Structures are given as structure tokens and as C-alpha cells.
Image (cartoon, rainbow, N blue to C red):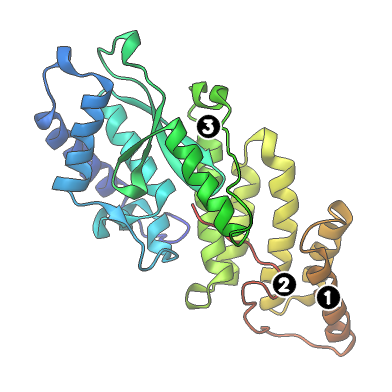
Amino acid sequence: SKAASPALDEAAVYAQVAEMERQLLETLPPPRDRYTLRMVRCLNEFFFGIWRFDGDREDYYNPANSCIDRILERRLGIPVTLGILYIELARRVGLRLVGVSFPSHFMVRPIAAVHAEPADEVEFVIDVFGRGEVLFVEDVEERFGRLMAQNKGGGEGRPKVQIDRSFLQDTSPHSRAVVTRVLQNLKATHMAHQAHHDAELALLLCRMQDVAAPPGARERINTLNLRDRGLALHSLGRLAESRDCLSMYLQVLPDAQDAPKIQNLLEVLAKQIEGGGGGPRPYLRPGTYGPPKSSS
């Protein structure tokens, strides 16, 4: 939120979340009856019913959907940011949740309620973007099978998707991965959508991602940010810097899916630099040179 809104009043955000916590506590059953599914139902009724939070389907790539202060104001967000707020509220009332970063959709999963019995711990996830829909693992596998079929244009049959159950037994909050995903959504918004195009902010978000990335993903993210930084620099007219970043990207990933498009841009850059071109360049539309996309 600070990157997009330097004047953010953090104290006001914390105060509003604390007030939501106070109101939520008043709706919960006695501590002895706080089993996981019951707690989830109470949280859903409060979050989506009383406070009327929802997924922003009409303006998904609005930068406000990646800023907690604006989400609290508008009551709209995207999966990962709604998930962050949902997890924090749950934590404050004793329900432990963690994020589950599926490839194209962020969901949350319970670990334990305050007085949960071992038998209460069933394998399910919560689709916060879908107004708290509870999905069992088989439901998620079916959903992603349909999504893969759609992405492949129908084809013959539906791909069989099977989720490794150990993936759902991880109890780490993976805070760096979640922050990196939020930054990716915001960066994609400012690079791939003309209405919100802001190359300077995209460069800042690249730097933030480089620092925030979890150790296991840092090399990959740093490499992708060479490409994204090069695209942002090109649109700012900083041609030599753009060429250097994009060249380094191809050196590291010569077989990248977007390598032909990046190579084409490098050839354009060479002519622009030779001709003394400078100043801001045209906005790079999605697909032209492979800017990042996001659906989280």
C-alpha cells in the first residue's frame, strides 16, 4: 500500500482492523464451541455478510485492489489481498489460517481453531474471492481441471489434476511468498494495463520484489525482473539501460517462451539507439513484448 499511496495512514488501517476484530468477537460462539468449520461460517457471515467484502470482478486490475487501505474503504479486492485480510481477522480471534498459492488463484486453508479436536481437521480450502466458498481437495482438482481444459481450447477430454496432499499439510505462513505475489499483481497492473500504466512505479516494484522474494524463488524472480525492468525502462526512453536488462534476461533464459519477442525488441532498440532515439516510448500492450500477466 505504501508504494501506491505514500500518504497511507497505517494507524488508521490498524484501528479499523481492530474494530472489525471487536465486532467479530461479539458474533462468535462460546470458546468451547469454536470448531473449525463453525468458525469459518461465522467469519464468512461477518466478512461477506455484515461487512460486505467481495471480489472485484468488474475492475480486477484496479491498483486499489492491491492496497489494504483501499480494500477496507471499497470493500473490494483480489484473491491474495482479500485473503491477507481474512487471515489476519481469523488470527485475531484464534483461527489459524495459511495462504495456499495455487498457480492461478490464491486461497486460504485452516490449520486449527481455538478448541479444535483432531477429528475436526479436515482437508479443505476457502475461496475468499468466491465469498468464502468451502472447497474440498477434490473440488479444487475438478476446478483446475476445467480451467486447464479452457486454457487449451477444449481439446479432447479434461486434464486430470491431482494435488499433492503434502502441499496442504504445510503450516508455514510463507509471508515472503505472499508479499511477492501481491507485488507481482500490482506490477502487472502498472505494466500490462494501459489505464494504470506507470513505468516508474513498475521499476520500484521490481526492486521491492527482488528484496521480498523467498530464498527458494529469488533467482527466478530476479531473472524475470530483468525482463520487466527492461520493458519499463524502454517505455521511459532509457534505451541503453533497457537493452542491457533485456540482454541479460536472454543470457540467463535463452529458451524462455517470450525469447523471440524480447529478441525482436532488442533489434528495435539497437536501431533506436543508433538513431539517437530517446524520451518516453509508446505503452507496451500485453502480448507485444511479453509483459507479465497475473490472475491472483
Tell whether label 1 touches label 2 (CB within 8 Å). Answer: yes
The amino acid on which the numbered mark 2 sits, given as a three-letter code, is: Tyr
- In x, y percent, where is residue 1? 42, 54
Alpha carbons under labels 1 and 3: distance apart: 37 Å
Instruction: Name the disc covering residue 264, or none.
Output: 1
Residue at the location (46% across, 33% down)?
A: 138
- On the image, numbered disc 3 is attached to which residue? 174
- On the image, numbered disc 2 is attached to which residue? 289
- Identify the mark nearer the N-term, 2 or 1: 1
- In x, y percent, where is residue 250? 85, 59
Residue at the location (83% across, 68% down)?
A: 260
Q: 90 or 139: nearer the eye?
A: 139
Q: 287 or 141: nearer the eye?
A: 141
Residue 231 appears left or right of 145: right
SS under mark 2: loop
Vertical order, 28 against 140 (above or below): above
Label 2 or label 3, whichever lies nearer to me, is 2
The amino acid on which the numbered mark 3 sits, given as a three-letter code, is: His
Residue at the location (63% across, 44% down)?
A: 211
Residue 80 appears left or right of 152: left
Residue at the location (35% across, 35% down)?
A: 87
